[in-house]
Image (cartoon, rainbow, N blue to C red):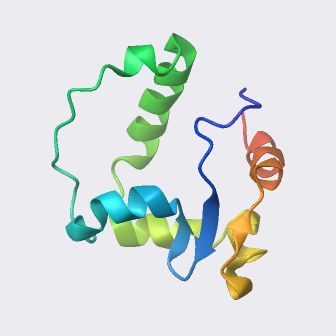
Amino acid sequence: MYDLPFFDEPIQAWRHGPVCPDVYQKYKSYGARPITEHNDEDFTKTFTKDHLDLLDEVYSVFGQFAAWKLRDMTHEEEPWKNHEALAEEIPQEEMRLYFKTRQP
């Protein structure tokens, strides 16, 4: 559906799953608890309607899961498994190709 990433920051394979280090630093104080911080940013200026629709769909599917369940799910996915041992960046192209095969 989308061949371009939603953001430019790297995704790294950490012990507990894929991580965007900048996002981790911002929200790490929440731990496994839900993020309750409210943001007044208007995301319609950042993302297209199609992107926002996809984000809503992802949330409707995965928003029901606790942090540890999401962690376990990522440990079954090739992009994380291929890079986890070295705790290195997961190439965007590898993620794109992997998730492209999982589209309906």
Q: Which residue is depicted at the point 21% across and 34% down?
A: 39
Say above or below: 16 vs 58. below
Nearest to the observer: residue 13 or residue 62: 13
Quarter placement of the C terminus: top right
Q: Which residue is depicted at the point 83% across and 46% down?
A: 97
In the rendered structure, the answer to whether residue 22 lies left or right of residue 4 reads: left
Q: Position of residue 98 (x, y in %)?
A: 79, 51
Say above or below: 42 vs 95. above
Count of marks overlaid on the render: 0
Residue reaching furthest to the bottom: 85
Quarter placement of the N terminus: top right
In the rendered structure, the answer to whether residue 2 lies left or right of residue 18 reads: right
Q: Which residue is depicted at the point 50% across and 20% down?
A: 47
Say above or below: 47 vs 21. above
Q: Position of residue 31 (x, y in %)?
A: 26, 71
In the rendered structure, the answer to whether residue 35 lies left or right of residue 55 reads: left
Q: Which residue is depicted at the point 62% across and 67% down?
A: 12
Q: Position of residue 90 (x, y in %)?
A: 72, 63
Nearest to the observer: residue 61 or residue 99: 99
Residue 66 placement: quadrant: bottom left
Residue 75 placement: quadrant: bottom right
Say above or below: 62 vs 55. below
Q: Position of residue 26 (x, y in %)?
A: 32, 58
